[in-house]
Image (spheres, rainbow, N blue to C red):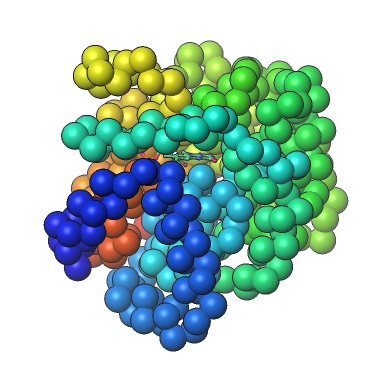
């Protein structure tokens, strides 16, 4: 089935404006998920054998999740869960709605199997996301909610802005991803420094620990980090018990031909894979299995998913791979993992 997408549908979609296609996909998914028969049919076509595991106290039917940024307003989660994912990371959600950066801001690099985006956290805000999830929950898979900061909020005010978002979203997520690594929000990545990160996450963890249900946290890191910042983030993760997501998109253009060098934004997909894997490996050697790791960046098939699991990821996520390989990607990855007799050590 994946073959049909690659041969016919992708060709068609790739002739159209990338953001328009994305919006149409979300709109269609939103409508489709209202019809139970459609959900069941899609589920039947995309479901593979379960490869169960438990990470951060949550049970997953398989280790392959949807990466943040695909469903920014948490509005198509029921349909997306039907694509066979083991979990969904929704958002990034900010406290107040914001339009994001001027268009065009999403580019396909089809020869390179890549995407450059400078969306800038375009989203309808936390209250809207919460309202959507109110309608859609419960879902058959764990849901992570990625939180970020509004573009008009300074770095000094970031901890308050994130915390307010968390408070609105807390009841709706099974875990929370603190996004400090989008390259499209000015200075966001400066939050990687150990002290700034501490100031950011401590209030959120304190809030969570005061709730009836204490939920797990992950911090999503950039692939372009200096060792010092990675070491700081890993040390804090160990001290506080949160996991890491390695990685977000890169600002590096070293793996790209000259034509794309001047395009600003975050690069994802195949050219990100090595950089992201290097960061995942370093993170794994620093945390030594004591806190969970999610690998994201350049997964396009079973082999590239297995590679990250082998490097120390407990779970993996896909975004660009879904755009290039289509809606049967999760099934294809899971069938590959099963053929290779992969089983999680965290069963
Ligand atoms: C168009 C687009 C939008 C994204 N938006 C977000 C976002 O809002 N929050 C986030 O944490 N990551 C975001 N990402 C990064 C992805 O979640 C993922 O970490 C990254 O693309 C690497 O994985 P991939 O190579 O499978 O795409 C976005 C990626 C793309 C391509």
Q: Residue at x 67, y 48 (%)?
A: 124
Q: Residue furthest bottom?
A: 37
Q: Residue at x 42, y 35 (%)?
A: 106
Can you give x and y, in whole percent of width and height, for residue 274 in the image? 29, 28
Does residue 70 sit above or below 35 in this rendering?
above
Task: Out of 279 and 325, give the one closest to the viewer.
Answer: 325
Q: Residue furthest right?
A: 210
Q: From the viewer's perspective, is 93 left or right of 71? A: right
Can you give x and y, in whole percent of width and height, for residue 147 in the image? 65, 42
Q: Name the quarter where the N terminus is drawn.
A: bottom left
Does residue 244 sit above or below 286 in this rendering?
below
Can you give x and y, in whole percent of width and height, for residue 230 in the image? 52, 22
Q: From the viewer's perspective, is 297 left or right of 302? A: right
Q: Quadrant of residue 186?
A: top right
Task: Out of 158 and 306, give the one closest to the viewer.
Answer: 158
Q: From the viewer's perspective, is 258 left or right of 175? A: left
**Residue 267 shows up from this direction:** yes
What is the tally of numbered marks visible in this picture?
0
Q: Name the quarter where the C terminus is drawn.
A: bottom left
Does residue 207 sit above or below 327 in this rendering?
above
Q: Residue at x 36, y 75 (%)?
A: 42
Q: Residue at x 41, y 62 (%)?
A: 85
Q: Quadrant of residue 161?
A: top right
Can you give x and y, in whole percent of width and height, for residue 308 in the image? 33, 42
Does residue 138 sit above or below 189 in this rendering?
below
Q: From the viewer's perspective, is 35 left or right of 172? A: left
């Amino acid at each position: 089935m994946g073959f049909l997408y690659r041969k016919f549908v992708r060709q068609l979609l790739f002739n159209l404006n990338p953001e328009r296609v994305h919006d149409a996909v979300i709109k269609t998914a939103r409508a489709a998920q209202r019809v139970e028969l459609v959900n069941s049919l899609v589920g039947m076509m995309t479901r593979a054998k379960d490869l169960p595991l438990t990470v951060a106290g949550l049970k997953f039917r398989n280790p392959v999740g949807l990466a943040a940024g695909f469903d920014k307003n948490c509005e198509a989660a029921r349909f997306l869960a039907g694509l066979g994912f083991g979990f969904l990371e929704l958002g990034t959600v900010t406290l107040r709605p914001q339009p994001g950066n001027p268009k065009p801001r999403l580019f396909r690099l089809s020869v390179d199997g890549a995407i450059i985006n400078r969306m800038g956290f375009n989203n309808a805000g936390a209250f809207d996301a919460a309202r959507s999830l109110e309608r859609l929950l419960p879902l058959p898979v764990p849901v992570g909610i990625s939180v970020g900061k509004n573009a008009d909020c300074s770095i000094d005010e970031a901890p308050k802005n994130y915390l307010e978002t968390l408070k609105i979203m807390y009841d709706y997520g099974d875990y929370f991803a603190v996004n400090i690594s989008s390259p499209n929000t000015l200075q966001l990545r400066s939050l990687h420094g150990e002290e700034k990160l501490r100031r950011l996450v401590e209030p959120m963890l304190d809030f969570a620990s005061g709730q009836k249900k204490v939920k797990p946290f992950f911090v999503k890191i950039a692939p372009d980090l200096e060792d010092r910042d990675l070491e700081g983030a890993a040390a804090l993760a160990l001290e506080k018990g949160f996991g890491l997501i390695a990685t977000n998109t890169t600002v590096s253009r070293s793996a790209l031909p000259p034509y794309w060098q001047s395009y600003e934004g975050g690069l994802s997909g195949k050219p990100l894979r090595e950089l992201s894997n290097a960061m995942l490996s370093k993170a794994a050697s620093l945390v030594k299995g004591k806190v969970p790791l999610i690998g994201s960046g350049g997964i396009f098939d079973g082999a590239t998913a297995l590679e990250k699991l082998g490097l120390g990821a407990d779970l993996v996520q896909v975004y660009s791979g879904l755009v290039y390989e289509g809606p049967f990607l999760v099934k294809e990855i899971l069938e590959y993992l099963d053929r290779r007799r992969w089983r999680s050590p965290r069963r």
